[in-house]
Amino acid sequence: MAQVKMSDITTQGIRVGAAAFYLAEESDPAENQFVFGYNIVIANEGEAPAKLLSRHWIIIDASGRREEVQGPGVIGQTPRLEPGQAFKYQSFCPLKTNWGTMEGTYTMQRDDGEEFTVEIGRFYLAG
């Protein structure tokens, strides 16, 4: 298996780690269908609680096709993280090529209503 390249970036006390893996059993290379799973860890290393409101992904495949995905929460949840807490989840991304990249942002909100953007560093979808 290829070495996993993980992204790890902190914005305003919110640390986001992301790593992908190839799902061979879900993929069909003969039909240009490649499915990658990815693990995300969102950790509040700051001093104030924050709630995840929405996500914005930018997905680029090996042919340069760019897709943007936006929506509320992650996996149907909008976790609120106290300082020192972390939220982990797993999802997947289908591509038409055997590699690509993902990166994006989360919109978070403090208890006082202030919204801010948290970066999700680029990570690679590769078999």
Image: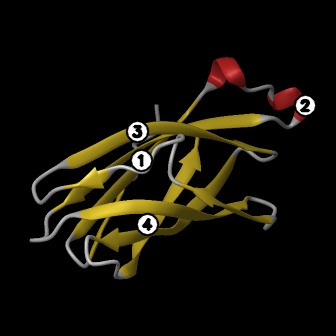
Q: Which residue is mark 4?
A: 120
Residue 122 versus residue 35 in the image, above or below: below
Most foreground residue, 30 or 104: 104
Q: Which quarter of the rendered picture does the C terminus lie within?
A: top right
Q: Is residue 6 left or right of residue 36?
A: left
Q: Nearer the viewer, residue 32 or 104?
A: 104
The residue at which mark 3 appears reads as 89
Q: Which amino acid, by three-letter code, is at mark 4?
A: Ile
* Residue contact at pointers 1 and 2, CB within 8 angstroms: no
Of the numbered discs in the image, which one, if any, rests on residue 31?
2
Numbered disc 3: secondary structure: strand
Q: Residue furthest right?
A: 31
Q: Pick whichever of labels 4 and 1 is earlier in the sequence.
A: 1
Task: From the image, tell me which residue sits under label 1.
Answer: 19
Mark 4 touches mark 1? (CB < 8 Å): no
Tag 4 secondary structure: strand
Q: For numbered disc 1, what is the local secondary structure?
A: strand
